Amino acid sequence: MASTSTTGGTGGGKANGSGGKDESGRGKRVENREDQGNCGSCYAFSSMAGLEARVRILTNNTDKPVFSPQDIVGCSKLSQGCEGGFPYLIAGRYAQDVGVVLEQCYPYEGKDDVCHTKTQCGRHYTAYYRYVGGYFGGCNEEEMKLALVKGGPLVVGLEVYNDFLHYKGGVYHHTGLMDRFNPLELTNHAVLLVGYGEDAHTGEKYWTVKNSWGEGWGEGGYFRILRGQDECAIESMAVEGIKFRDMEMINGSMPRLL
């Protein structure tokens, strides 16, 4: 989903809000990124950020790749460019079958008219991906916490309502009417879940999540959302890339198939 508003303060911090504690410790391995702009490329941003974080964790932060969302937006046949896409097909199938390239190979343009990926660029492949819980709709709070702590950040979807666009800080929960007819857990935005905790003042449980609307939105580009109640379908379709192909690490670097 494209950002239609970037209003809001900087909140309490990039990965944690006021008085809370990130209990997973995985948010430290997440690259800060630019705003996706008016292109509906959230699925590409969150998918690439998730893979980047997994590589950093896998290599103990010695390899810090920054992958290209633009390669997905401009070249993927498994998504609809700036009109959206599904993280499962990008962080999963595209990364496994086609491979992803580095940001320097194809910098972000925010448009999907022509594919300009350089043919000489090396591609990076995942060996295995899955929905948390084993299938679509199989995940829940405990499954997500376990996957987050064991492996790292998760790509998740949520349903964005107008009040979310103007979020400035705190633990978000939707305050208006919700769409109750959602047998497949309606979502329209993809983001990266990086941690969890409890608000020290209210006691509310929350997820810490990285958005792709720039650092001027929310809590330094992040937000916290109610945890354990599938708020806005945040606990409905978490995706993770588990391994990278050819896991024989050379000098601690991520494997590359050129």
Image (cartoon, grey):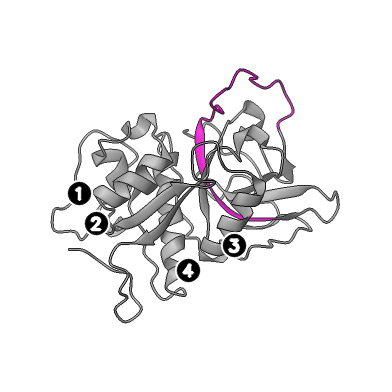
Disc on the earlier residue, 4 or 2 = 4
Callout 1–callout 2 Cβ contact below 8 Å: yes
Q: Residue at x 72, y 36 (%)?
A: 173
Looking at numbered disc 2 in the image, what kind of residue is underneath it? Cys
Q: Which residue is mark 3?
A: 149
Q: Which residue is mark 4?
A: 57
Q: Residue at x 61, y 34 (%)?
A: 233
Q: Tell me, for residue 75, which label it has, or none.
A: none
Q: Residue at x 31, y 40 (%)?
A: 73
Q: Nearer the viewer, mark 4 or mark 2?
A: 4
Image: 59 above or below 73 = below
Q: Which residue is mark 2?
A: 105
Where does the image place residue 153, in percent across and percent down from the top left?
53, 56
Q: Nearer the viewer, mark 3 or mark 2?
A: 3
Where does the image place residue 96, in percent across and percent down from the top left?
30, 51
- The quarter of the picture where residue 256 lies is bottom left
Q: Which residue is mark 1?
A: 117
Callout 1–callout 3 Cβ contact below 8 Å: no
Disc on the earlier residue, 1 or 4 = 4
Please tell me which residue lies in front, 140 or 134. 134
Looking at numbered disc 3 in the image, what kind of residue is underneath it? Val
Callout 3–callout 2 Cβ contact below 8 Å: no
The stretch of residues the image draws in magenta is 174-196
Please tell me which residue lies in front, 7 or 169. 169
Mark 4 secondary-structure assignment: helix
Looking at numbered disc 4 in the image, what kind of residue is underneath it? Ile
